[in-house]
């Protein structure tokens, strides 16, 4: 059975358009409660959210559905996605739900799930929830209804968890950094974490109003952070996305340091201090330059499909503890169970503090190959894998790049897009070839 609603990272879409509607979320809460109730005597579900205005609506709808199924609900309020994963584990809850559309604009929203171990749901569990959605919704008897409460100290618990991942012997005293919280879920906790560890912190993007999440700020829009790092003469800038599971950094010279480079910095720091990783998991989109730089250090790179859940799966399969994506999903599996922007940033800052080197110096051994990425909007249901004109053009491009570069062509799991990525030594050629494929895609629907 193929999944109707779940993509690579939960359910996501435009608010008010099915299935991102209040009535669907009511039913989804009920279906989730029923699925987790089938295997446990007492069902307890945590709900967190980012700062989108629609979060109020979906929080209430999910709460009502879960209570109708007999589940106990704990509301966390605005919290980063990885915080919900951590609290789900620490509270011994049955599941955790995050209401967020990550780096998208406020007009979108979505739902992410965690199981009791703080991991993304398996395909099997997602299919069980989808099957339950097709069943008629029946409220349990009144004596079996769930109750809802709010965890008022949730931010403080997560702040302490993050701080405990930073080496005890280190301090951030004397470090000046700029935090860009994307007007999102990290706006409360991130400034606390870095300030309490001793850093001098300049905060931006921390005034959410329900509508400004990710707007010209955050990890997908680092221009404002680059300017602020330069004007403040800061040692480093740190940008999170709307739900806090991604991070990008800005070096002291104003240059952006992406997830591939941050992964290299963390891996190399572990190597320097006697904790060499067995390997690092990246994705099909990870830059070849990172793979080459890691190889020179004796660290292999394995590539998973794009999506943090696939990175996690391959990490588990290999028994490796470090993985991530160029977008800034970085998973430190020895510290937490999912991508965590704050914890990843702390590992990078720890590498700077331990070495006494700048972020620029720490990443200097990595020389990225030029990449061109074009996102092509396609109709829902566009079948990339059977579109012969696109496949034919792709084969021609691969032949032209043989030995000098590579092509990655994939459908997005969260948006109606086909992503065309070409990596090679010649940036101009990359651009021309990518635009050629993109045009064939546009003409094929």
Image (cartoon, grey):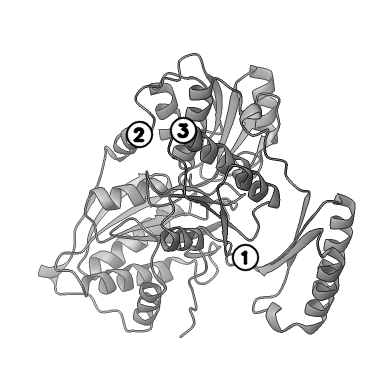
Question: Where in the figure is residue 120, as x and y percent of width and height?
Answer: 40, 61
The residue that mark 3 highlights is 346
Residue 159, disc: 2
Q: How far apart, in angstroms, are the residues tagged by discs 2 and 1?
A: 32 Å
| Marks 2 and 1 close (CB-CB < 8 Å) | no
Q: Earlier in the sequence, mark 2 or mark 3?
A: 2
Q: In the image, is residue 213 above or below residue 179?
A: below
Name which of mark 2 and mark 1 comes first in the sequence.
Answer: 2
Return the residue nearer the eye: 144 or 101: 101
Using a 10 Å C-alpha cutoff, classify the residue at mark 1 as few (fewer than 14 neighbours), some (14 to 19) or many (20 or more).
few
| Foreground tag (2 vs 1) | 2
The quarter of the image holding the C terminus is bottom right
Residue at 57% of width from left, 50% of height from top?
Answer: 103
Q: Secondary structure at mark 3?
A: helix
Q: Residues within 10 Å of mark 3 (few under 14, many from 20)?
A: many
Q: Secondary structure at mark 2?
A: helix
- Residue 285 % position (x, y): 66, 57
**Residue 140 placed where, x, y %?**
18, 74
Which residue is label 1 attached to?
Answer: 415
Q: Nearer the viewer, residue 207 or 358?
A: 358
Residue under the image location 20 percent in, 68 percent down: 70
Quarter location, residue 29: bottom left
In the image, residue 405 sits, relative to residue 270, either above or below, namely below
Q: Marks 3 and 2: in contact by CB < 8 Å? A: no
């Amino acid at each position: 059975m193929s999944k109707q609603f779940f993509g690579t990272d939960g359910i996501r879409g435009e608010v008010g358009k099915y299935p991102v509607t209040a009535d669907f979320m009511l039913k989804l809460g009920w279906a989730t409660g029923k699925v987790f109730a089938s295997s446990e005597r007492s069902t307890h579900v945590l709900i967190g959210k980012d700062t989108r205005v629609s979060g109020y609506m979906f929080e209430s709808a999910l709460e009502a559905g879960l209570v109708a199924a007999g589940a106990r609900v704990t509301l966390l309020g605005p919290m980063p996605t990885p915080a919900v994963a951590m609290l789900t584990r620490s509270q011994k809850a049955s599941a955790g739900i995050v209401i967020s559309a990550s780096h998208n604009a406020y007009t979108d929203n979505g739902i992410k799930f965690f199981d009791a171990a703080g991991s993304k749901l398996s395909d099997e569990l997602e299919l069980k929830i989808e099957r339950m959605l097709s069943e008629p919704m029946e409220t349990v008897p009144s004596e079996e209804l769930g109750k809802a409460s709010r965890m008022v100290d949730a931010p403080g618990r997560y702040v302490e968890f993050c701080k405990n991942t930073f080496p005890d012997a280190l301090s951030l005293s004397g470090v000046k950094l700029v935090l860009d919280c994307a007007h999102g879920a990290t706006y409360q906790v991130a400034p606390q974490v870095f300030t309490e560890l001793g850093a001098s912190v300049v905060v931006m993007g921390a005034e959410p109003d329900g509508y400004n999440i990710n707007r010209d700020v955050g990890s997908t829009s680092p221009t404002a952070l680059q300017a602020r790092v330069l004007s403040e003469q800061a040692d480093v800038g740190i940008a999170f996305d709307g739900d806090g599971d991604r991070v990008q950094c800005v070096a002291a010279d104003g240059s952006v340091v992406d997830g591939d480079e941050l992964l290299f910095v963390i891996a190399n720091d572990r190597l320097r201090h006697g904790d060499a990783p067995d390997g690092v998991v990246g994705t099909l989109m990870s830059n070849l330059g990172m793979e080459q730089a890691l190889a020179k250090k004796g660290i292999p790179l394995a590539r998973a499909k794009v999506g943090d859940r696939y990175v996690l799966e391959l990490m588990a399969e290999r028994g490796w503890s470090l993985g991530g994506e160029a977008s800034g999903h970085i998973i430190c599996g020895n510290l937490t169970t999912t991508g965590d922007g704050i914890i990843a940033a702390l590992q990078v800052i720890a590498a700077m503090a331990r070495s006494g080197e700048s972020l620029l110096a720490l990443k200097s051994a990595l020389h990225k190959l030029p990449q061109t990425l074009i996102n092509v909007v396609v109709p829902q249901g566009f079948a990339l894998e059977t579109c012969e004109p696109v496949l034919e053009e792709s084969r021609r491009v691969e032949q032209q790049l043989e030995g000098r570069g590579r092509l990655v062509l994939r459908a997005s799991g969260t948006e109606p897009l086909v992503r065309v990525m070409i990596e090679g030594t010649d940036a101009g050629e990359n651009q021309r070839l990518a635009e050629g494929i993109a045009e064939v895609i546009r003409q094929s629907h």
